[in-house]
Image (tube, rainbow, N blue to C red):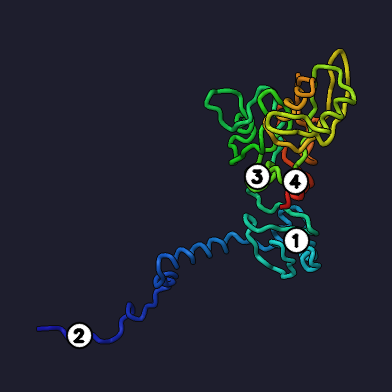
Amino acid sequence: MPQPVDSSPRDVDRFVPNVNPAKHQHVSEDEAAQILASEKKEKQQVRLQKVLASAGVASRRMSEKLIAAGRVEVNGEVVRQMGLRIDPSVDVVRVDGTRVQVNEEMVYFVLNKPRGVHSTMHDDLGRPHVGELVEAKFNQGQGLFHVGRLDAATEGLLLLTNDGELANRLMHPKYEVPKTYMATVLGEADRALIRTLKEGVDLEDGIAKADYVQIVDVWQGKSLVKIELHEGRKHIVRRMLKAAGFPVQALVRTKIHTVQLGEQKPGTVRALNSSELQSLYKAVGL
């Protein structure tokens, strides 16, 4: 004999599951991808005053005062909105017109490249190279690359970074970033050499001029010459001095714009300080 059907509501019928419906269940794949990208971007955003504090500009409270005073710009626009969220990996922040590096993933170093080391991050021939020095220092290269080159026989200042935009601009002739070298040459240099280098030396790929030349010392048939120029052609300093009749015996790059080698020992790496980095930004219009 069939049993009567129980039509009274059961507990399972009255139960409302505590589950949020899928957010993107009624959108196309393209729309869903855009929404997910937007959500990811939102997660990457941080309050502006926190970003400034993390960058060492000021405390959060003082950063709020800077924002309220209209002294902070984001992507070229003055910001007064408190609590504005930005993406430090993309947005450009300035305080009083000076750019602040807020992207913690970007790193900037000065290497004193020793003589005999090649300006490459890898070398298939097994020769000593910059990459070895970086890996020894940081275990990993952090995606670093060298800004420009120094030939193997030349020592001195080499910038390392993972900031492609800054690196490209520093190397571009348009910005005329000055570089300073100390060259030990054969021959006793005099004021005629200074005049020759500043007026320009005719090389196979065109005239090359120095911006500044100083004879630092002369001894026993040799001279120490300081030369500053914004040229970036290959072996430019060596070729200029050879064409002027003073072949180079040793060459050291001591300065790029305002970044100086100072007392840094060959083979060592140090981080750029904030004033050096800001100066480089300014030099190339970033």
Number of labelled discs?
Answer: 4
Q: Secondary structure at mark 4?
A: helix
**Which residue occupies the foreground of this view, 42 or 279?**
279
- Residue 120 appears at what percent x and percent y? 60, 31
Q: Position of residue 260 (x, y in %)?
A: 79, 36
Q: Quadrant of residue 249?
A: top right
Q: Name which of mark 4 and mark 1 comes first in the sequence.
A: 1
Residue 261 in the image: state x and y as whole percent: 78, 33
- Looking at marks 1 and 2 on the same chain, the residue that comes earlier in the sequence is marked by 2
The numbered dot on residue 5 is: 2
164 left or right of 64? left
Nearer the N terminus, badge 2 or badge 3?
2
Circles 2, 3 touching at the beta carbon (< 8 Å) = no
263 and 159: which is toward the camera: 159
Q: CA distance from mark 2 to mark 3?
A: 79 Å
Q: Earlier in the sequence, mark 3 or mark 1?
A: 1
What label does residue 168 carry, if any?
Answer: 3
Q: Amino acid at mark 4?
A: Leu
Asked whether disc 4 touches disc 3, contact meaning CB atoms under 8 Å apart, the reply is: no
Amino acid type, mark 3:
Asn
Mark 3 crowd level (few <14, some 14–19, many ≥20, 10 Å Cα): few
Q: Which residue is mark 4?
A: 280
Q: Which mark is residue 60?
A: 1
State the residue at coordinates (56%, 31%).
122
Quadrant of residue 127 within the rendered picture: top right
Give the amino acid type for the residue marked by disc 2 in the picture. Answer: Val
